[in-house]
Image (cartoon, rainbow, N blue to C red):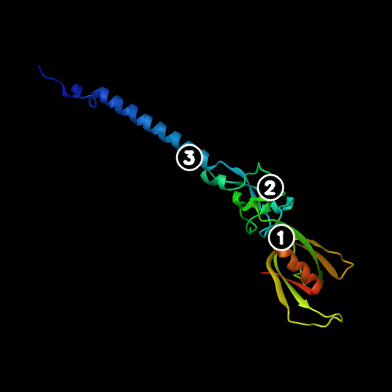
Amino acid sequence: MKINKNLRFGTRGPRGRKLRTIAAGLTIVFSLIAGITLIAASSKTVALWGVARDLGIGSTIHGGDLVLRQAHLDRDANIYLSGGYQPVGLYVTRDLRAGELLPATSVAKNDGLAMRRVVTVEIENHHLPPDVARGDLVDLYVTSRGAGGEILAAPERVIGDVVVDSVDINSNSTHFGVALSLLDVDVPAVVEAAQRGHLDLVGRR
């Protein structure tokens, strides 16, 4: 008796064609599911905090410094500060630039940094950048003067890369009150310079 070879092998004959058709259909279904899942993942957005303006290290975050942004991120989303977390009152631990997303490691509570103090110095008009604002980095210079106002020495830099915490602008005054965020160890030098002579704030571009 002859054996029909098409019936002996499960991959041939009517039954084999049916199995191949089912397998092909399942492959298409799985491919469609994978494609839909991939598209859904790529279109998923998360709310993250972004930097609205330049902020120097040591700045305290206020309400207008950050803005919520919808970002298309998946695995890397956790390295940025989630929009569900309130960052106001935290300190900036590195320089931040407007437009970037806020890394979670770039902010800390007060006890996460070296002790800081806020010292206000009086700066004469036209002796500071015209657009100086909170969060800017500046250098502080002093020119020693005598009792009669005479210059006693060349200007010297007291401290560099200091962060402006706030600026008190009084249109009726020729002087500005500029609060500087300082490390505790730098406070004496700034206070001494304010008593010794004329102060200048030098900005950056």
Residue 32 is situated, as x and y percent measured from the top left of the image, at: 44, 35
| The image quarter in which residue 165 lies | bottom right
Looking at the rendered image, the disc whose residue lies closer to the viewer, 3 or 1, is: 1
Seen in the image, is 110 located left or right of residue 104?
right
Query: Tag 3's secondary structure?
Result: helix
In the rendered image, residue 24, in percent from the top left (x then y), is placed at: 34, 31
| Residue at 69%, 64% in the rendered image | 162
Q: Could you give the CA–CA distance between mark 3 and mark 1, rounded to whole angstroms? A: 52 Å
Q: How crowded is mark 2: few (under 14 residues within 10 Å), some or many (20 or more)?
A: many
Say how many tags the image has: 3
Quadrant (top left/top right/bottom left/bottom right) for the N terminus:
top left
Q: Distance between the residues labelled 3 and 2?
A: 32 Å
Instruction: Judge from the rendering whether residue 67 lies leftward or rightward of residue 23; answer left or right.
Output: right
For residue 184, the mark is 1
Between circles 3 and 2, the one closer to the viewer is 2
Q: Which of marks 3 and 2 is nearer the N terminus?
A: 3
CA–CA distance in space, label 1 to label 2: 24 Å
In x, y percent, where is residue 71? 59, 47
- Looking at numbered disc 2 in the image, what kind of residue is underneath it? Pro
The image quarter in which residue 121 lies? bottom right
Residue kind at label 1, given as amino acid type: Asp
From the viewer's perspective, is 142 left or right of 9?
A: right
Looking at this view, name the residue that lies furthest to the left: 1
- Quarter of image, res 171: bottom right
Q: Name the amino acid, label 3.
A: Leu
Q: Residue furthest right?
A: 172
* Mark found first going from the N terminus, 3 or 1: 3
- Residue bearing the label numbered 2: 87
Q: Mark 3 points at which residue?
A: 38
